[in-house]
Amino acid sequence: QMEMGQMDAQTKKMEEMRKKIEMEKDPAARKILMQEQMQMMKDCMKMMEGQGMMGGKGMMGGKEMMGEKGMLMDDRMGMMEKKMNMMQEMINGMMMQQEVKTK
């Protein structure tokens, strides 16, 4: 199972990358950062799929989330919140990728 600390670190990495892209003025350097961002998001998706976080039992229910592992309700809610934060940061990155394509 992916730990909360890992999710925080991944979310922070994606957020930092997005900020770096926003600050970069040179189009060539920005393009390279955008490619790195896309790879980072793909890696994150693989990691989330591997952890059962995308769809199926992992996201909103299933036995793992409902206490079979003895997680306290607060822990489960904290884990869900971290998953949502990480997914929001991925959405932010994808929106940034789309903006570039439409310009």
Image (cartoon, rainbow, N blue to C red):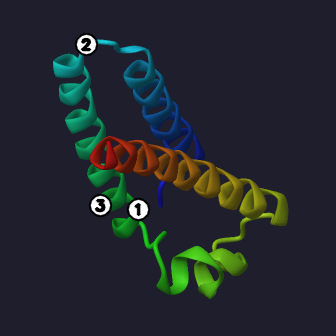
Q: Secondary structure at mark 2?
A: loop
State the image coordinates of residue 8 (x, y, percent, origin top left): 56, 38
CA gap, disc 2 and disc 1? 32 Å
Q: Which residue is mark 3?
A: 46
Left or right position of 102 against 22: left
Q: Are marks 2 and 3 in contact (CB under 8 Å)?
A: no
CA gap, disc 1 and disc 3? 5 Å
Q: Is residue 58 above or below residue 48?
A: below
State the image coordinates of residue 103 (x, y, percent, origin top left): 32, 42
Query: Is the residue marked by circle 2 packed among few (<14), some (14-19), or many (20+) residues within 10 Å?
Result: few
Query: What residue lies at 63% left-to-right and 57% top-to-bottom?
Result: 84
Q: Which residue is mark 2?
A: 26
Left or right position of 19 against 88: left
Q: Secondary structure at mark 1?
A: helix
Mark closest to the chain's N terminus, 2 or 3: 2
Please name which of the two marks, 2 or 1, marks the residue nearer to the observer: 2
Q: Is residue 53 above or below residue 29?
A: below
Q: Secondary structure at mark 3?
A: helix
Query: What residue lies at 34% left-to-right and 67% top-to-bottom?
Result: 50
Is there any visible trace of residue 3 in the rendered image? Answer: no
Q: Which residue is mark 1?
A: 48
State the image coordinates of residue 96 (x, y, percent, origin top left): 42, 42
Query: Is the residue marked by circle 1 packed among few (<14), some (14-19), or many (20+) residues within 10 Å?
Result: many
Q: Are marks 2 and 1 in contact (CB under 8 Å)?
A: no
Query: Is the residue marked by circle 3 packed among few (<14), some (14-19), or many (20+) residues within 10 Å?
Result: some
Disc number at residue 2? none
Q: Which residue type carries mark 3?
A: Lys
- Foreground residue among 33 and 25: 25
Query: What residue lies at 18% left-to-right and 27% top-to-bottom?
Result: 32
Q: Which residue type carries mark 2?
A: Asp
Q: Which residue type carries mark 1?
A: Met
